[in-house]
Amino acid sequence: MVLTGCQSTVDGGAVREAALEFRPVVVSYPTNALTPGVTSSACPGKAASADKACRQSADLAPAGSTPADPAAQMAALNALDCGGADPLDADPALPLAACDRDGVELFILDKAFLDERHVAEATSGIDPQGVGYVVTLSFTAEGTDIWARHTESHVNERVAFLVDGKVVSAPTIQGAIHGDTTIHGGVNGFTRDEAENLVAALGG
C-alpha cells in the first residue's frame, strides 16, 4: 500500500517534531458536497474548528452496536476551517473531524491506532517508480504488529495518515502489510527538502 501526499513540518525554517497519526476513515466528503448550514449546539459554526466537543464528539464514529450520528458528523464537517494550521490539539483516543492538506476532502476519522511513537526510523530517497522523493517508515516491533493486524483485518477500507492534524493521505488498504510503509508526495512527489524535513521531524 502507498500512503500518498505527505508534507514537511517546519516552523520558521526550523524543523520540529511532527505529530503523526494513523486513523481509520469512517466517512469522507468532497468539500463541495457538504449539506450547507447544518450546525449543532456543539458545532455552531466555523468558530468550533478548535473545539473538541464539536470535532471529537464520541458519536462521530460507531461504537459497538451504536451507530454514528450523521447529523453530528455533518455539523462537525461544516465547522471545519481548512485554512492554515489545524488549531486543535486532538485526543487520539476520540474520533476526529479533519481536513486534508489541500482542503478538497473532509473526513470523519475513528480513534488513532498508530502514532509517531511507533516509528523506529524514517528515511528519504528518490522515488524509483515515479517523480521526486519518498519517505519510508520503519515501525517498532509493536508498531509493525499493530500495522500488520490492522491492514490484514481492514482490507478494502481506507486509512488516513495525518501530520499535525491534517490528512495527507487516505489510501485504500489492498492487503496485509508486514513491513515498511512508503509515503509518496503526491503527483509530483516530495522535493528533496520536503522529504528530508519530514524525516527530521519524525526523528529519523
Image (cartoon, rainbow, N blue to C red):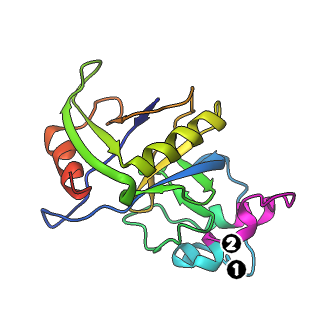
Give left or right: position of 36 versus 193: right
Q: Is residue 184 above or below residue 28?
A: above
Furthest toward the front, the residue is 141
Q: Name the residue under label 1.
A: 42
Query: Which stretch appears magenta?
Result: 55-75
Question: Counting residues from the N terminus, which is met first, the one under dot 1 or under dot 2?
Answer: 1
Residue at x 53% of width, y 66% of height: 92
Q: Residue 191 carries which label?
A: none
Q: Mark 2 points at which residue?
A: 57
Residue at x 18% of width, y 38% of height: 191
| Residue 196 in view, yes or no | yes
Comparing 85 with 122, the one in front is 122
Quadrant position of residue 131: top left
For discs 1 and 2, the disc positioned in front in the rendered view = 2
Residue at x 37% of width, y 64% of height: 84
Q: Are marks 1 and 2 in contact (CB under 8 Å)?
A: yes
